Image (cartoon, rainbow, N blue to C red):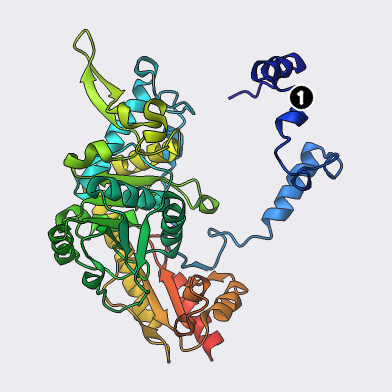
């Protein structure tokens, strides 16, 4: 999209229309201390060759996933192989756009892939209807709580201790400004979840994660029944969407809303974003669902086509009364997800999930041979937690110096919990080789000695 700057005449016309004499007057409400007086102190201009050398030197300071001697980082963002066909196909003119498809007559490519995306997400999660994507998994989780509040007309949500701490933080931010209550269970890696005691007549929903933040896989069928008996909804969060190629989908457990992160299919790590949020629910709740919906229809000549449907829920029509304020969001990431999943197919996704699980089992079995290292959870997909017997953070730094990215210290999220200081979260995917596992085991043995 070209950048066409405003002319001085354009600015004056705009200022006159809103009744402001100057640009400075427009920003008069911004405190003087927060405004810059004068030009930025920028370095001299560089030529293209100099810029390339400078950027290359900066990049060399990073320990990239592809250049590491072992990559075991997960925690909600996962390193998977993305076929070259994905990046090629998303550039096709039928799809590549920064424009929200409000005009169906010029947006059939975009609307069709969004319809296919919704179908894939609904099938994958075992739900009845899915929207055209959210910003990411964390905001999808917070939107799920807001939706549950609308559906139940209650104002209190229960968060599992196994929920990703970043997702919990986003929910807390929404709660502070939207005015609802949160009851958050203390995290207990590898332990049980006693959520029943937190559910009462004021509970709008219970939010759980499967596999949870520490890698544990659980069956939430009984919890779903408890929620429904109390008139509450069950929200299931999935941060590693590839897991649904192998484990039971949330819909089969009785989930009412599924909020997930779709990065693991079709999208690289991308420095932490952009990612793509997935959102699915029961059809009876569709009018309270946030985000756009693409629907299939026929035109005046009887030809199949696609349009945005149930749009009266959205902000471009209902403004402040909309179910959400999702706009253009990360549609290109949703397209990458759609193409990659279509290339995989049902059998391919199952095989990919099996490769991930096998890699994690191989890693866990190898690490258990190290003296003093204890596996915290036995039921996992491609991610699990270990107890090292000494603080994990310094060991991770020591291994990074050996070009091994050895997972995430849990203390990064819960520094106040002394009992979590020695916990390390590790992930393995189809890209994790036996040689990677051997290097990590050797490195851990060395730094633990």
Q: Is residue 378 visible?
A: yes
Within-10-Å neighbours for mark 1: few <14, some 14–19, many 20+:
few
Q: Toward which corner of the image does residue 51 lie, by quadrant?
A: top right
Q: Toward which corner of the image does residue 113 lie, by quadrant?
A: top left
Q: Please provide percent x and percent y for residue 439.
A: 49, 76
Vertical side of 93 occupied by 446: above or below: below
Q: Residue at x 37, y 55 (%)?
A: 180
Q: Please provide percent x and percent y for residue 95.
A: 41, 27
Q: Residue at x 24, y 74 (%)?
A: 194
Horizontally, is 21 left or right of 307 in the view? right
Q: Nearer the viewer, residue 398 or 239?
A: 239
Q: Please provide percent x and percent y for residue 437.
A: 43, 73
Q: Residue at x 23, y 59 (%)?
A: 246
Which residue is under mark 1? Answer: 22
In the orientation shown, which residue stands out farthest toward the top?
301
Horizontally, is 218 left or right of 260 in the view? left
Q: Is residue 261 visible?
A: no
Q: Please provide percent x and percent y for residue 227.
A: 18, 61
Vertical side of 235 occupied by 130: above or below: above
Disc 1 is placed on an element classified as: loop
Vertical side of 134 occupied by 25: above or below: above
The N terminus, quarter of image: top right
Q: Nearer the viewer, residue 76 or 403?
A: 76
Horizontally, is 21 left or right of 43 in the view? left
The C terminus, quarter of image: bottom right
Q: Nearer the viewer, residue 175 or 201?
A: 201
| Number of numbered discs | 1
Q: Residue at x 34, y 69 (%)?
A: 162
Q: Nearer the viewer, residue 104 or 21?
A: 21
């Amino acid at each position: 999209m070209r950048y066409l700057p405003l002319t001085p005449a354009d600015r004056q016309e705009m200022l006159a229309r809103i009744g402001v004499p100057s640009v400075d007057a427009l920003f008069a409400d911004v405190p003087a201390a927060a405004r810059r007086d004068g030009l930025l102190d920028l370095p001299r201009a560089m030529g293209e060759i100099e810029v390339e050398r400078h950027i290359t030197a900066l990049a060399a300071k990073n320990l990239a996933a592809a250049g590491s001697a072992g990559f075991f980082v997960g925690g909600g963002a996962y390193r998977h192989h993305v076929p070259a066909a994905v990046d090629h196909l998303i550039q096709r003119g039928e799809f590549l756009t920064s424009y929200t498809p409000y005009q169906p007559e010029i947006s059939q490519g975009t609307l069709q892939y969004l319809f296919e995306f919704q179908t894939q997400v609904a099938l994958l999660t075992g739900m009845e209807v899915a929207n055209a994507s959210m910003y990411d998994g964390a905001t999808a989780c917070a939107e799920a709580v807001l939706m549950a509040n609308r559906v139940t007309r209650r104002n209190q949500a229960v968060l599992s201790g196994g929920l990703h701490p970043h997702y919990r933080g986003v929910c807390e931010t929404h709660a502070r400004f939207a005015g609802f209550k949160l009851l958050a269970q203390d995290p207990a890696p590898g332990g049980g979840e006693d959520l029943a005691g937190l559910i009462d007549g004021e509970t709008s929903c219970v939010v759980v994660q499967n596999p949870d933040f520490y890698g544990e896989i659980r069956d939430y069928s009984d919890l779903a029944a408890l929620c429904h008996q109390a008139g509450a909804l069950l929200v299931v969060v999935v941060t590693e969407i590839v897991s649904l190629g192998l484990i039971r989908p949330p819909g089969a457990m009785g989930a009412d809303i599924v909020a997930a992160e779709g990065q693991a299919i079709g999208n690289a790590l991308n420095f932490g974003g952009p990612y793509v949020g997935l959102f699915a629910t029961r059809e009876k709740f569709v009018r309270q669902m946030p985000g756009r919906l693409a629907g299939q229809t026929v035109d005046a000549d009887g030809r199949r086509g696609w349009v945005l449907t149930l749009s009266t829920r959205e902000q471009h029509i209902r403004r402040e009364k909309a179910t959400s304020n999702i706009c253009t969001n990360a549609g290109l990431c949703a397209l990458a997800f759609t193409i990659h999943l279509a290339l995989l197919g049902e059998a391919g996704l199952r095989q990919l999930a099996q490769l991930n699980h096998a890699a994690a089992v191989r890693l866990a079995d190898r690490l258990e041979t190290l003296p003093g290292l204890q596996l915290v959870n036995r039921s996992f997909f491609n991610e699990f937690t270990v107890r090292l017997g000494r603080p994990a953070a310094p060991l991770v730094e020591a291994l990074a110096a050996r070009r091994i990215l050895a997972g995430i210290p849990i203390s990064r999220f819960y520094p106040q919990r002394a009992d979590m200081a020695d916990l390390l979260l590790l992930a393995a995917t189809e890209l994790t080789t036996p040689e990677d596992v051997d290097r990590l085991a050797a490195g851990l043995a060395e730094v633990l000695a």
